[in-house]
Amino acid sequence: MKTKLALSVLLILLMSCSDKPESGPANIYYGEDICERCKMIVSEKDFASQYQLSSGQSVKFDDLGCMIHYADEEDNLNISSVYVMDYSSKEWIDGQDAYYIWSQNITTPMGHGILALKDSKKAKELAEKENGKYLGGLENASEWVLKEMKNN
């Protein structure tokens, strides 16, 4: 009986130490975690992103451009969720529901100049303010990045 109780307590403790919540994005440890594509340290919250794979693994990135290129370069990735940092609120949002902009005036860790916002109107306003381009949803942003920035 004591063994079962001890194992139950141990299991609960191990589960509570996990970096990945039961749903939603995994924790990113800024200044410690490494971008899966460029292998640089993820240090700026404004530009962080991640894929959740169907296996449960989190794949973290320091720049939205790295996230897009990584998906294009990898075979059989099996992405179940995409999370990006909303540039306005600094909170995680669903990357499939986000709106993306690009501007050469925006300095991102790997120089892609891509930002994500949860509000379309704010995204269009920021693109105009930064003399940039409103890219729309993730599919359009991905196509644009892969076409326009294929060498990055």
Image (spheres, rainbow, N blue to C red):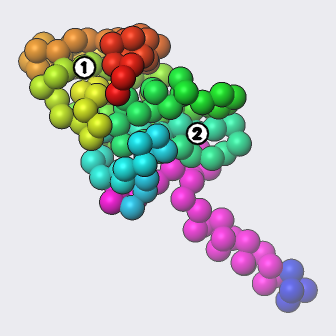
- Give residue 102's mark: 1
Q: Is residue 20 left or right of residue 109?
A: right
Rendered residue at 69%/37% (across/down) = 54
- Separation of residues labelled 1 and 2 (CA atoms): 24 Å
Residue at the bottom extreme, as displayed: 2
Can residue 142 be seen here? The reply is yes
Range drawn in magenta: 5-31
Can residue 115 be seen here? The reply is no
Percent x, y of residue 86 = 31, 34
* Image height of 98 relative to 4, above or below: above
Mark 2 surroundings within 10 Å by alpha-carbon count, few (fewer than 14), some (14 through 19), many (20 or more): many
Secondary structure of the residue carrying tag 2 is: strand
Q: Quadrant of the N terminus?
A: bottom right
Ranked by sequence position, the earlier of labels 1 and 2 is 2
Percent x, y of residue 94 = 46, 30
Q: In the depicted view, which residue is nearer to us: 66 or 4?
A: 66
Would you say residue 27 sits in the magenta stretch? yes
> What is the quadrant of residue 4 in the picture?
bottom right
Q: Which residue is mark 2?
A: 52
Percent x, y of residue 102 = 24, 19
